[in-house]
Amino acid sequence: MDFTKIDFAKFDVAKMFDVDGAIAQMEDANGKAISLITDKKAKSIAETVSAASFEFARAQAAAAKAFGEAVKKAIQI
């Protein structure tokens, strides 16, 4: 493959993979799993850790998107 003929300015990861959709599906599945926990304290801890983890995942997705946009802009210069 000749990588010199690829227009990286048109490369859009968001069109290849729906990160927000994937995170939402994982969060839904995780919520269903947590709902099976019967111990109140364990369930509370699992909910707290889960919420923090998904906030982190969303922040990482936003950072990756911003990085991709910066790379596209840099290539256009």
Image (spheres, rainbow, N blue to C red):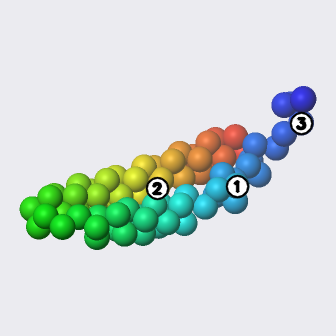
Q: Which residue is mark 1?
A: 16
Q: Residue furthest left?
A: 41
Q: Which amino acid is tagged 3?
A: Lys
Residue count near mark 1 (Cα–Cα under 10 Å), binned few <14, some 14–19, many ≥20: few
Q: Which amino acid is tagged 1?
A: Met
Q: Foreground: 18 or 9?
A: 18
Q: Foreground: 68 or 16?
A: 16
Residue 43: x percent and y percent?
A: 18, 63
| Residue at disc 3, secondary structure | helix
Residue 55: x percent and y percent?
A: 33, 59
| Residue at disc 2, secondary structure | helix
Q: Nearer the viewer, mark 1 or mark 2?
A: 1
For marks 1 and 2 on the same chain, the one whose residue lies earlier in the sequence: 1
Q: Quadrant of the N terminus?
A: top right
Residue 49: x percent and y percent?
A: 23, 55
Q: Is residue 60 left or right of residue 34?
A: right
Q: Which residue is mark 2?
A: 62
**Residue found 90% across the figure and 29% down from its top:** 2
Q: Foreground: 70 or 62?
A: 62
Let me know if residue 59 appears in the view. no
Q: Is residue 21 left or right of residue 57?
A: right
For marks 3 and 2 on the same chain, the one whose residue lies earlier in the sequence: 3
Q: Quadrant of the C terminus?
A: top right
* Marks 3 and 1, how far apart at CA: 19 Å
Q: Which mark is residue 5?
A: 3
* Marks 1 and 2, how far apart at CA: 16 Å
Residue count near mark 3 (Cα–Cα under 10 Å), binned few <14, some 14–19, many ≥20: few
Residue count near mark 2 (Cα–Cα under 10 Å), binned few <14, some 14–19, many ≥20: some
* Marks 3 and 2, how far apart at CA: 28 Å
Q: Which amino acid is tagged 2?
A: Ala
